[in-house]
């Protein structure tokens, strides 16, 4: 019994140590990751063949501890893929039609160090070759946190990567051969919801050679009125769709009531031309499952009552006829 009790105490002590290790380990990981920040996370710029354009990012050390942060900067190809349109970055994406720009980008500095609460501004220069076709080009500025370099002045740095973060740049190369082409498909609003929110979705296929900016919004009206009960038309959502890709987009009215019947309209547009937009409108019903049971119960009760009443009348007529 004593041996069993001792084993229990040892097991509990091991579990406690493991739990504390996990908690403090998680906190340390968060502290490391929170030290490096890059802004802005996304940028757009227009460049011109034969000319040089510049932009900048800011790298900050938000460390609460008194430690120096070392980092490197590089340009890598960027794209998106999959049903969730996840971002993809890395040298393995090189060679695509829309990643040539990584060869044209240089930085004011490719590495640096920051004291706590210090910030560096990194200037990047895009030198576009003469004769470059018009269209989209995409890259990410990859900032890697590292351990202290063995030779901060040398070209061959031995670095151990700890964390990396990227700032994405959407570039348009000016030219007469830019093609903004695509289609908005599957603009869909379900008719029936068991609970809020009301959701709507659509897909965008980009068949051009530059990115499309899709502005989309939802309008909700009472069934017998044109007075909006909800809309984000004044502040529409934005989705960027890269060339040669299809993006699935959804939005919702999160404050929809538990029960109701509404007229819902979804608008998605990528140009000032009225042909460059898709509009769909449907009658939408929100009816929770408990209300369905109540309605079915009431209808069933009414049907049973009517059947019983008809049967009672029939029996009464038969009694009268027999008398």
Image: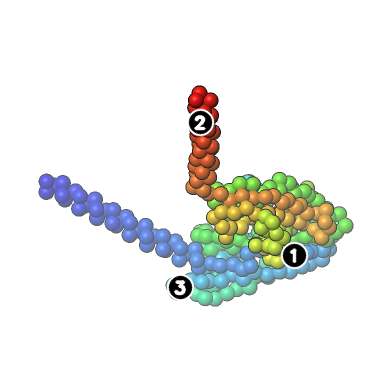
Discs 2/1, front: 2
Element type where label 1 sits in the image: strand
The answer to whether residue 101 shows anywhere in this view is no
The residue shown at (78%, 64%) is: 46
| Mark 2 or mark 3, earlier in chain | 3
Residue 161 located left or right of residue 86: left
The residue shown at (11%, 48%) is: 2
The residue shown at (53%, 71%) is: 61
Question: Which of 71 and 246 lies nearest the eye of the viewer?
Answer: 246
Residue 45 is labelled as 1
Discs 2/3, front: 2
Whether residue 263 is situated above or below residue 303 in the rendered picture = below
Question: Which of 9 and 107 lies nearest the eye of the viewer?
Answer: 9
- Residue 115, percent from left and from top: 51, 75
The residue shown at (49%, 25%) is: 323
- Residue 267, percent from left and from top: 73, 55
Whether residue 217 is situated above or below residue 40 in the rendered picture = above
C-alpha gap between disc 2 and disc 3: 90 Å
**Residue at the disc numbered 2:** 316
Question: Which of 175 and 207 lies nearest the eye of the viewer?
Answer: 207
Element type where label 3 sits in the image: loop
The total number of labels drawn is: 3
**Residue at the disc numbered 3:** 64
- Residue 317, percent from left and from top: 53, 29
C-alpha gap between disc 2 and disc 1: 87 Å
Which of the 4 image quadrants contains residue 51? bottom right
C-alpha gap between disc 3 and disc 1: 34 Å
Counting other residues with Cα less than 10 Å from the Cα at mark 1, is it few (<14), some (14-19), or many (20 or more)?
Answer: few
Question: Which of 27 and 261 lies nearest the eye of the viewer?
Answer: 261
């Amino acid at each position: 019994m004593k041996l069993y009790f001792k084993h229990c105490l040892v097991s509990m002590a091991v579990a406690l140590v493991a739990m504390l290790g996990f908690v403090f380990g998680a906190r340390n990981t968060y502290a490391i990751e929170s030290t490096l920040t890059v802004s802005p996370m996304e940028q757009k710029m227009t460049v011109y063949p034969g000319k040089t354009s510049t932009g900048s990012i800011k790298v900050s050390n938000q460390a609460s501890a008194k430690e120096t942060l070392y980092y490197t900067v590089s340009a890598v190809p960027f794209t998106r893929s999959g049903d969730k349109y996840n971002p993809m970055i890395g040298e393995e994406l090189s060679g695509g039609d829309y990643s040539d720009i990584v060869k044209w980008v240089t930085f004011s500095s490719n590495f640096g160090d920051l004291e706590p609460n210090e910030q560096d501004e990194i200037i990047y220069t895009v030198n576009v070759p003469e004769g470059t076709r018009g269209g989209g080009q995409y890259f990410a500025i990859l900032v890697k946190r590292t351990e202290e370099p063995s030779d901060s002045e040398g070209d061959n740095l031995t670095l151990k990567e700890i964390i990396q973060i990227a700032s994405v740049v959407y570039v348009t190369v000016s030219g007469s051969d830019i093609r903004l082409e695509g289609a908005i498909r599957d603009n869909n609003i379900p008719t029936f919801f068991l609970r809020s929110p009301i959701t709507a979705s659509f897909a965008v296929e980009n068949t051009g050679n530059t990115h499309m900016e899709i502005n989309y919004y939802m309008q909700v009206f009472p069934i017998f009125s044109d007075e909006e009960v909800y809309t984000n038309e004044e502040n529409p959502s934005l989705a960027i769709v890269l060339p040669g890709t299809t993006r699935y987009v959804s939005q919702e009215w999160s404050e929809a009531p538990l029960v109701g019947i509404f007229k819902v309209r979804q608008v998605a547009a990528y140009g000032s031309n009225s042909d460059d937009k898709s509009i769909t409108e449907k009658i939408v019903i929100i009816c929770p499952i408990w209300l369905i049971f109540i309605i079915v119960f009431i209808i069933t009760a009414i049907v049973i009552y009517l059947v019983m009443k008809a049967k009672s009348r029939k029996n009464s007529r038969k009694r009268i006829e027999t008398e």
